[in-house]
């Protein structure tokens, strides 16, 4: 059954994809700046391009999570959204705040932006991924509180399911851990210690609960497998996620002056972090194999399976490659870290947001699925984006291995910039595959406009 208030998810999904395109464009700009240092300088310096690239990633994924929540919670609770008007109002607040922040990065020197936005009152700027000015951070808190209020009130008046409860737990954790972005101690050890409480406990903790609940929802819809079976899997996966993810935060503490025991705690528990991702992959394939019906939306099913596989490869396997302290001693801060980051974000979060959009957008437009022709295009986009991000990861891994050897292990170690010249071929290859990724994303967007025979929802 479709609920009228689910329509508020549509603008969130559209904004998410538009910002995603912007993120990739700035990624390509950065990629060129790696090999052509003066590209677009001084209009868009590298540090600005990087801020825009990473901030757009965070913002568009948050739009995707919010849209997914507004779509699936009414169905899970079997009741209309508490306040669709509040959801739309917060959409515009978040979109305008995000757009103004990006324009601020591009048009105003960062130090001047900090002075203009009250950073001297409460210093929160200048930290990687959390560069947002104070008004933007406060705006994010307001939007998050209004969003949580809306979702929680809907949940309280309707049916309670494991999927909606796990989702709300993940969203609550997202909001709570973001509050540590306001704590910016002058002591560098404390600064980094609590900085990871936002960055790590988001992406390797509570965001995984959001991922699991969205994936479980889509799998119930496209496979028809009993809810009880899927919910049991979900409980096991989130338990492993929280146990490994929370204590696994310690693998970031090797280098910041934290107590020595974190080397052991971080190594052991972060080495276990691939397990929930492997379980997620098995879960997805198992549910599809046990399906009781052939859902007309084959593209969404492909995205759901791809999420499990790519999340395991990026967050699980590539994370494990350099998470142990004796290995990280050499690889810390190299292109191997960048390789893991790109594939992990794509596999775990980009793919699941595209999964729910692939499933929900046709229904929001009055059909069970896009036309067969459109779905073929969408499946092409899946393979173009997935293969190209995997190749980007391989090229960055190659660059990282060579970087470690030339800069840190060799008997005659080379300087950082000299090494960058030696590995520039990998950067050129990364840039070419980045263009292919952008083409895949454009194909994904175009697939929603392809005409053809459709089945009514």
Image (cartoon, rainbow, N blue to C red):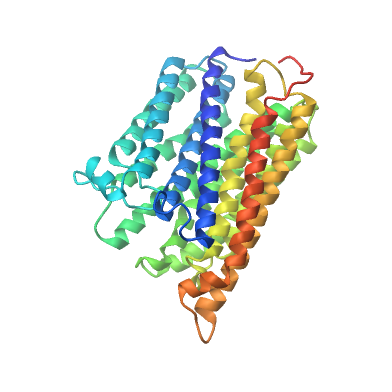
Which one is in front, 449 or 127? 449
Q: Is residue 298 above or below residue 333?
A: above
Where residue 68 sits, quadrant-wise, is top right
Q: Residue at x 55, y 17 (%)?
A: 7
Which one is in front, 180 or 136? 136
Q: Is residue 143 above or below residue 419?
A: above
The percent coordinates of residue 39 (x first, y second) are: 48, 55
Where residue 391 sits, quadrant-wise, is bottom right
The percent coordinates of residue 134 (x first, y second) are: 28, 40
Where residue 399 sits, quadrant-wise, is bottom right
> In the rendered view, does 397 fall on the left or right side of 48?
right
Report the residue that reaches farthest toward the bottom: 411
Q: Residue at x 74, y 37 (%)?
A: 379
> In the rendered view, does 438 fall on the left or right side of 407?
right
Q: Residue at x 69, y 43 (%)?
A: 306
Image quadrant occupied by the N terminus: top right
Report whether residue 18 is seen: yes
Q: Residue at x 66, y 20 (%)?
A: 363
Image quadrant occupied by the C terminus: top right
Report whether residue 278 is seen: no
């Amino acid at each position: 059954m479709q609920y009228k208030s689910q329509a508020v998810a549509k603008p969130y999904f559209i904004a998410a994809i538009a910002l995603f395109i912007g993120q990739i464009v700035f990624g390509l700009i950065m990629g060129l700046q790696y090999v052509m240092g003066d590209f677009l300088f001084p209009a868009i310096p590298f540090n600005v391009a990087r801020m825009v690239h990473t901030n757009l990633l965070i913002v568009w994924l948050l739009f995707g999570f919010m849209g997914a929540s507004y779509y699936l919670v009414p169905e899970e609770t079997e009741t209309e959204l508490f306040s669709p008007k509040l959801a739309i109002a917060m959409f515009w607040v978040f979109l305008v705040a995000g757009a103004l922040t990006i324009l601020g990065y591009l048009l105003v020197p960062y130090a001047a932006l900090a002075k203009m936005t009250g950073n001297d009152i409460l210093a929160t700027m200048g930290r990687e991924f959390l560069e947002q000015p104070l008004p933007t951070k406060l705006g994010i808190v307001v939007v998050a509180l209004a969003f949580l209020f809306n979702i929680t009130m809907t949940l309280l008046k309707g049916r309670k399911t494991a999927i909606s409860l796990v989702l709300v737990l993940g969203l609550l954790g997202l909001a709570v851990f973001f509050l540590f972005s306001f704590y910016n101690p002058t002591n560098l050890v404390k600064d980094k210690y609590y900085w990871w409480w936002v960055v790590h406990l988001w992406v390797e903790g509570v965001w995984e609960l959001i991922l699991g609940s969205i994936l479980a929802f889509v799998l119930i819809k496209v496979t028809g497998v009993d809810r009880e079976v899927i919910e049991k899997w979900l409980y096991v996966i989130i338990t492993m996620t929280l146990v490994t993810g929370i204590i696994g935060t310690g693998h970031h503490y090797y280098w910041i002056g934290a107590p020595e025991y974190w080397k052991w705690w971080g190594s052991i528990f972060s080495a276990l972090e691939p397990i929930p991702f492997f379980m997620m992959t098995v879960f997805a394939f198992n549910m599809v194999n046990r399906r009781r019906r052939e859902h007309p939306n084959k593209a969404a099913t492909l995205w759901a399976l791809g999420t499990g596989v790519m999340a395991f490869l990026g967050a699980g396997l590539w994370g494990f490659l350099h998470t142990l302290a004796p290995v990280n001693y050499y690889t810390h801060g190299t292109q191997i870290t960048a390789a893991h980051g790109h594939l992990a974000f794509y596999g775990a979060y980009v793919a699941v947001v595209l999964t729910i959009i692939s499933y929900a957008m046709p229904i929001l437009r009055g059909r069970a699925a896009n036309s067969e022709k459109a779905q073929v295009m969408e499946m092409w986009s899946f393979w173009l984006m997935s293969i190209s991000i995997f190749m980007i990861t391989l090229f960055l891994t190659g660059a990282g291995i060579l970087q470690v050897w030339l800069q840190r292990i060799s008997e005659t170690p080379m300087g950082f910039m000299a090494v960058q010249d030696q590995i520039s071929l990998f950067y050129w290859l990364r840039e070419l595959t980045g263009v292919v990724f952008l083409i895949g994303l454009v194909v994904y967007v175009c697939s929603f406009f392809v005409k053809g025979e459709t089945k009514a929802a």
